[in-house]
Amino acid sequence: PEDEEVLTGEVAPTAEPGARPAPPVLAVVGRPNVGKSTLVNRIIGRREAVVEDTPGVTRDRVSYDAEWNGRLFRLVDTGGWELEARGLDRSVAEQAELAVQEADGVMLVVDAKVGPTSTDEQLVRVLRRVGRPVVLVANKVDDSGQAADVAALWSLGLGEPHPVSALHGRGSGDLLDAIVTMLPEHSQVATAQPGGPRRVAIIGRPNVGKSSLLNRATGTSRAVVNDLAGTTRDPVDELVTIAGTTWRFVDTAGIRRRVHLQQGSDYYATLRTQTALDRAEVAIVVLDVTQHISDQDLRIIDMVLESGRALVLAFNKWDLLDDDRRGQLEREIEQRLGHVSWAPRVNLSARTGRHLEKLVPALEAALEGWDTRVPTGKLNAFLHELAQANPHPLRGGKQPRVLFGTQAATQPPTFVLFTSGFMDPQYRRFIMRRLREVYGFVGTPIRIGMRVRE
Ligand code: GDP
Ligand code: GDP
């Protein structure tokens, strides 16, 4: 029945046919060093010893699943995330604004010992503008003698400050009560948390056969209107049933329209690809087997990796393949696509319909890898074993060690390793390879962030 429904207008994602509601999202914002990471660790129940003392490390956003009294929510931490250089030096306010726009509620953390600063006030202005409900946390209230410090935070105009000591746990139960009271039961904003049919983007350079593939697959499709309120994007998705499984192909208007346009500029093609990726969970990158695998193909694959979506490679126009080209193609795949050797490959023909149905197990495998969660206990047993068998090379007489690891997120699997020293990139890649060997992670990029505890 979900195929029958056609949505129009500004419908909340949770109202989508067959929607699985997503838990609400709580963004954690605040100046550096106010204790956000400590508080996040406290809430998700991790040891506090792993918080880093050096401010100013590269920061990005990372999210964690949390639970309080049977209520699930997703915590998005806007600080304390060390990753390879990517979008360095965004201001605190900018970071916060991004996170907040994708959140159902906000936890603003302020250092009660320092009192409200102008940066805090700036953050409050951002929060006002975005208009999400806010819980104000007065952190570093380690004992009861700080009532005046806490009272001073009323001046921020966000109502009652909740005094906590992230370090010692004081007040955290009351804070969590306030958080789950504030948050809606289901997210009103989380679109990355899909409901119903899973979201697929068909991407690839011009003329590889994207629209042919779409036409072939969408004999029985139904258009659905994009449910992002106030969006300026292409409004059309299509529900497509392949071999009995229904998928939501996103931004199909972009693919169809291109047929009628002159070759759009690279800029717009890239923009469209990015838009589709933003809304998708898994990408089918279409390649033309009659053409060499080009730099442009590789750039498109890189966009998938960057966006952290699951990946399936469709080798199209298989009907045109002769034996010479076949051997050459295999060598090209080995040479140019070695870095995505984990992605499922489907050899098909949009023209004849050959092997189209094989997209289904490929998409399912990729999404399964993308959704995989390795329990913390298992992960640490794995890390321990790995370090025993292959310790990190000595550096300056010291042995950088992984102290503890956790999978902070799925979609894509994202790991945070707390280490006793800086790890070589090769060693990080080695860990990734071993993770794939042991856990599969078919069809999904994986990410590893390191936090050094000096
Ligand atoms: P972030 O930059 O906001 O993520 O801050 P961190 O969580 O890294 O904490 C910054 C510093 O404040 C660390 O040295 C923490 O140990 C310390 N800290 C965090 N919470 C508390 C607290 O409740 N009380 C005290 N006394 N120190 C804290
Ligand atoms: P798009 O720009 O990626 O959407 O590519 P199109 O779907 O417009 O296809 C470009 C050209 O390739 C058209 O002439 C199609 O008919 C042709 N084409 C697409 N798929 C196949 C296929 O599987 N086999 C053959 N022989 N031709 C194909």
Image (cartoon, rainbow, N blue to C red):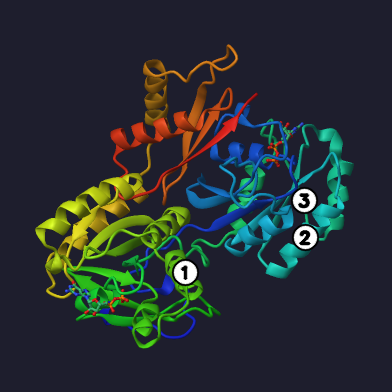
Mark 1 Cα-neighbour bin, 10 Å: few <14, some 14–19, many ≥20 = some
Q: In this rendering, is residue 279 above or below 167?
A: below
Residue found farthest to the front: 324
In what element is the residue under mark 3? loop
Q: Is residue 218 visible?
A: yes
Numbered disc total: 3
Residue in the picture at 70% in, 59% down: 94
- Give me the disc on residue 64: none
Q: Disc 3 marks which residue?
A: 161
Mark 2 Cα-neighbour bin, 10 Å: few <14, some 14–19, many ≥20 = some
Residue in the picture at 53% in, 80% down: 232
The mark lying in front, picked from 2 and 3, is 2
Q: Disc 1 marks which residue?
A: 270
The mark lying in front, picked from 1 and 2, is 1
Q: Nearer the viewer, residue 323 or 195?
A: 323
| Res. 2 image quadrant | bottom left
Q: Is residue 98 left or right of residue 322?
A: right
**Ligand 1 within 8 Å of the CB at mark 3:** no
| Res. 272 image quadrant | bottom left
Residue 358 in the image: state x and y as whole percent. 16, 61
Q: In this rendering, is residue 393 above or below 355?
A: above
Q: As shown in the figure, which amino acid type bears the numbered disc 3?
A: Pro
